[in-house]
Image (cartoon, grey):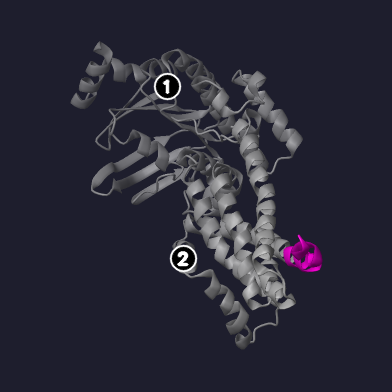
Amino acid sequence: MNVLLDNLDLYGRGFLGTIQLFLVAAIGSLLFGTILAGMRVSPVPVLRAFGTLYVNTIRNTPLTLVLFFFAFAYPRLEIADISFFWRACIGLILYTSAFVCEVVRSGINTVPVGQAEASRALGFTFGQTMSQVVFPQAVRSVVPPLTNVQIALLKNTTIAAGFSVVEAGGIYAALSERGYNVLVGLLWVALFFVILVVPLTLLQRNLDRKWSTAR
Amino acid sequence: MTDTGTPMIRMVTVDKHFGELHVLKDINLEVDAGQVVVVLGPSGSGKSTLCRTINRLEPIDSGVIAIDGEELPAEGKALAGLRADVGMVFQSFNLFAHKTILENVMLGPLKVRKQNKGEAEKNAMRLLERVGIANQKDKYPAQLSGGQQQRVAIARALAMSPKVMLFDEPTSALDPEMVQEVLDVMTSLAKEGMTMLVVTHEMGFARRAANRVIFMADGEIVEDAAPDAFFTNPTSDRAKDFLGKILTH
């Protein structure tokens, strides 16, 4: 218990960092992943090709590499000076979007083609067909796997500790410097992660219930 | 109906293949404003494809299709604008499953015609009244019977104030006792002077409501005649054979 109580500042800062990273990356990856999914089903061949290439490249790259790129290679490109925190966010967003894209795309495939045809016949543009008819139904049918991806993202944030973003994954290192029992410290970290996932699970259950009645 | 001389639907030397299969062979067809044309034919004769090419849900290989004198543009904003003027009713209804009945009818006018909400709702309610489902307006499509869903689909198409209505086998997916309620709506539309192209197997409707019957076989228009003439005195062997099969069973 002392490990936790003596180091509350450490845990507090760590998990605050984790939550911030997660919220930014979750929103960013949901948006960008959905746009990617739209590209992959669009009638424009160039967009389709880009979407496919993106997903197959990023999905097959280890997250560590993506983050290392932004930590060490990006500054050498001398494009714009961005803080470690935001570079970590960008890396997580780019990586997670590939997975969000594939989940949303599988949801798109559950929406009957006839409904897209009906909306085209009404005079909807491709964008309107997607935003009004296809995406709302696609997302509803993939809430559980989409939650999975976001839970994975939450845990992936710990990798950002590898390049000095303050977050929960780095707590153990600081603990051992201060001379505390690292094993016990890590158990607390694990417990906090479980607690962080609970709201996501509840959100999933709520959305599932709400949308299954409205169909 | 004012006859401007321009046919509402004009198809000139239209050809289409699905891979090896030649589904539409040199189709020439004109439908005048206010005309009701019923397309008959055995399955696989290309009649559904014909219907779907008219608003370019199926692109064609060659030829020209024009709606009210305006040639169909390639995919894009201009095509969307033209489709808005062509109502379409599908065999499988294709209502938006996540929207209520009222929202289904309002969505097109709101998003495509940019009507305000009050206007769109008033118009939608008038149309739902007309097809007899106003009391179901807050339900979702899955909660309605097939016949009711198809009547909503007709109301949804009418909400765009289309110049012409296409019906692609509108009663083929319905239980027999629900066919009539849909045909009644279509018959009243025809009486009001709506230009309609109807792909169907309902011979009664063809006799009662059509100005013209088109008989297709193997991707070609084989006969084009008034209903009475077609049913009592078909000229081609294909049509005689077809009518023999459906009228004697």
Kind of residue indicated by mark 2: Val
Q: Badge 2 local density, few (<14 within 10 Å), some, or many (20+)?
A: few
Quadrant where the image shows the C terminus of chain A: top right
Q: Which mark is residue A62?
A: none
Give percent across and percent down for residue B168.
Answer: 42, 31
Q: Which residue position holds label 1?
A: B210
Majority secondary structure of magenta residues: helix
Kindly state the secondary structure of the residue where label 1 is placed: loop
Question: Residue sitting at 24 percent across and 44 percent down?
Answer: B21
Residue with the mark numbered 2: A46
**Are labels 2 and 1 on one chain?**
no
Q: Secondary structure at mark 2?
A: helix
Identified by mark 1, the residue type is Ala
**Which of the 4 image quadrants contains residue B169?**
top left
Residue B152 image position (x, y, % from top left): 57, 26
| Alpha-carbon span between mark 2 and mark 1 | 46 Å
Chain under disc 1: B
Q: In the visual, does A107 lie left or right of B43?
A: right
